[in-house]
Image (tube, helix red, strand yellow):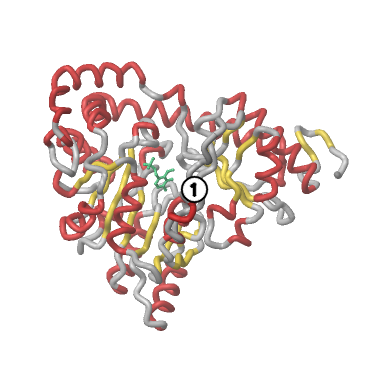
Amino acid sequence: MTQAFDFAPLLPADLPPAAVRFTGLPKYNFTGGNNDAAEVPVDDLIAAATASLKREGRNLATYNVAHGPQGYRPLREFLVTKLKRDAGIACGVDEITVLSGSTQALDLVNGALLTRGDTVICERDNYQSSLTRFARRGVTAIGIPLDGDGMRMDALEAALKDCKARGVRPKMIYTIPTVQNPTATIMPEARRLEMIRLSEQYGVPIFEDDCYSDLIWDGKRPPALYALARSGNVIHCGSFSKSIAPALRVGFLVAPWSIMSRMLPLKTDAGSGSVEQMMLAEYCAPHFAAHLPVLRKALRKKVETLMEALNEQFGTAAEFEDPKGGIFLWVKLPDNVDSMKLYQAALKEGVAINPGPEWSTDKQHATPRLRLCFASPTHEQIREGVAILAEVCRREFGVPTRSANIQKARA
Ligand SMILES: Cc1ncc(COP(=O)(O)O)c(C=O)c1O
């Protein structure tokens, strides 16, 4: 047998660590931003895909179906209407670029603004992928603590002041103001205006990551930072991953042309998939607004099951806020619980959780915390998974001492 070719000596030193081979999803999966399978509007998507392909399928012969690098125009037209109605954003189709998920927005914004040694400011508890992206670029992320209304403006102001005193101009304030990941907080309008004021005062632009904003239970969201800003200092991104389905891989950027024109050349995939964009445009115009309340209701039921299961199995050992929307719960366990160890032990029993330290700039603060996504497991899986998690937690850390109202001996 010939020996396998050795690529190792050829790999650049700064290549990310090797991928782990996919071996299937865990039985009880409380990780990732997956959606509720029962709520994917499959029949309407089939009809939309069929209608759009019948009408325009031959245009697939041309990159971007001849609509240019910013994406399929009818989808951007839908977004213009939707962003105006829901987020208060007044923009034209040229301010929008359709992307391969909002993940691509993170790469384009980071690519345009960041270089090794730079500083960014962001919420302390944060989207893991954003934090790893900053780290991989050699960028320092200053984490700002949150309260029930999201990023704290007194702490933001102090950080901006401190940076200025040190001669550092942060490249951006990266924020998830509407159903923050992982805390699920929603920043009220007054605080948004304060953030914009500070952004202008210190000359630091804002990158607003808004991918959960369609998932607020009562459908009422504050205006987007992009809508409130007057000086073009905000870049906004959104996604169809959380409102329709993440496997579509369709997200979007909204930005003034001055910076959009610097990000577009970094989109080097020769365009995002046009079939998904055509299908979405066809589906969304008649159906999107009616789909959302149905999805929100299903998600609300799931989080109620999760909160009930946590209360039953962990009692007062699990602390969390009843979220106003979204797909995850940020849970605090007693201080002696190390969620990294809990994660390893639970995974062996088929329960996957997101351990806090991977979701925060402050590892110590996040050690007893974990993020639980409730959208994709069924109600039964939520109940069973939480019961197993409590059992593992008790075995490893001696808490909770009481489960399902049954006193357990300390391990
Ligand atoms: C805050 C935040 N931003 C961006 C993304 C990326 O989502 P997608 O690329 O599927 O649009 C996610 C996904 O979970 C997220 O939580």
Question: Residue 91 versus residue 51: which sits nearer the camera?
Answer: 51
Q: Quadrant of residue 100?
A: top left
Picture quadrant of residue 39: top left
Residue 397 percent location from the top left of the image:
78, 48
Question: Quarter containing ligand 1?
Answer: top left
Instruction: Judge whether residue 383 can be spotted in this image.
Output: yes
For numbered disc 1, what is the local secondary structure? Answer: loop
The residue under the point 43% across, 78% down is 162
Q: Residue furthest right?
A: 409
Residue 102 locus on image (x, y percent)? 34, 45
- Of 199 and 260, the residue lying toward us: 260
**Amino acid type shown at disc 1:** Asp
Q: Quadrant of the N terminus?
A: top right
* Image point (33%, 54%), residue name: 208
Assess mark 1: CB under 8 A from ligand 1?
Answer: no
The residue that mark 1 highlights is 6
Position of 289 relative to 168 (above/below)? above
Number of numbered discs: 1
Q: In terms of image quadrants, where is residue 271?
A: top left
User: Along the line of sight, which residue is nearer the eye, 164 or 215?
Assistant: 164
Tell me the crowding category of disc 1: few under 14, some 14 to 19, or many 20 or more residues within 10 angstroms, Cα based. Answer: few
Identify which residue is drawn at 85% across, 44% down: 411
Residue 172 spot, x, y in % from top left:
34, 64
How far from the left and from the top, in percent, is residue 196? Answer: 30, 64
Residue at 69% across, 49% down: 341
